[in-house]
Image (cartoon, grey):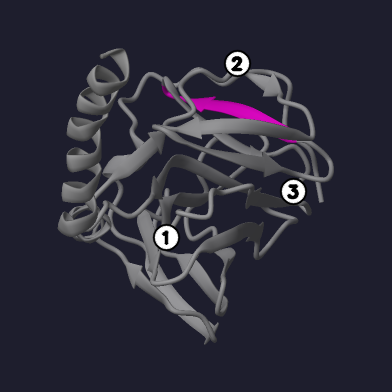
Amino acid sequence: MFSKNLAAVTVAAVFSLANFANAAVTVVSNTSSITIYEDQTQFATAAGRLGTDSFDDLTFGDQGIAAVRQAGSESYTIAAGQGLWGSEYAGNRYLSSADSSDLLLFSGFSAATRGLGGTFFGSNDNGEPVARGAINVTVTDATGVLVLTVSGGIGQGFVGFLSTAAVQAMTLQAQAPDRYFPSVDDIRIAAPVPEPSTAAMMLMGAAVLPLLRRRKGK
């Protein structure tokens, strides 16, 4: 167990967590209605409507114990018992726990939320991504729990989860907290797009309202 370094690290290399290769995903157990996606394009196509939180607005250092964040039109809460930490590596900002033994808890999703995605990886106390830094991920929906391990190369790559039921929470925890911190970048939240029939009814309702107003005016 250790804590993040207060000194920022400057690295000249061009770096983007989103450009890393796909993660190696090992499912431990699954009692949920969740489908796992390791390809961002396939996830985006299946999700239909996505909001992204890139964490680019974070300052370096302590972010408090909890924060309400926004991914497009979808809000959520992220928390860590010992605090959250804004980190930066080669110009890319991301979020991790302030204490390596802590876990990151994502919750407070709307009832319409059906999926989550993101780049999950381990980082050291200088903010550098750790090669083969396995992260234990737990995702809970209204039907059960999915437990898996995300590991592989530096940065781990993208993993997405879509469910037929409401997604309620997700946690990230370092498998080796003596070596690295659980870290995340580019959180994506998926909410269902209205069915064509529902969308048509909404449009019809919007068209009728002005007529009703006119009748009341007369």
Marks 2 and 3, how far apart in space? 19 Å
Q: Amino acid at mark 3?
A: Ser
Sequence order check, earlier mark of 3 and 1:
3
Q: Which mark is residue 100?
A: 3
Residue sitting at x 45%, y 78%? 26
Q: Could you tell me if residue 209 is visible in this image?
A: yes
How crowded is the residue under tag 3: few (<14 C-alpha within 10 Å), some, or many (20+)?
many
Q: Amino acid at mark 1?
A: Arg
How crowded is the residue under tag 1: few (<14 C-alpha within 10 Å), some, or many (20+)?
many
User: Where are the magenta residues, as a range?
Assistant: 84-90
**Where residue 80 appears, x then y in whole percent?**
76, 44
Nearest to viewer (mark 1 / mark 2) = 1
Count numbered badges in the picture.
3
Marks 1 and 2, how far apart in space? 30 Å
Closer to us: 74 or 206: 206
Sequence order check, earlier mark of 1 and 2:
2
Residue occupied by mark 2? 59
Nearest to viewer (mark 2 / mark 3) = 2
Left or right: 105 as drawn, with respect to 138: right
Residue 93 in magenta stretch: no
What secondary structure is found at the residue carrying circle 2? loop
Closer to us: 94 or 73: 73
Q: Could you tell me if residue 180 is visible in this image?
A: no
What secondary structure is found at the residue carrying circle 1? loop
Marks 3 and 1, how far apart in space? 29 Å
**Where residue 178 appears, x then y in whole percent?**
75, 56
**Where residue 54 appears, x then y in whole percent?**
42, 31
Residue occupied by mark 1? 114
Dominant secondary structure, magenta: strand
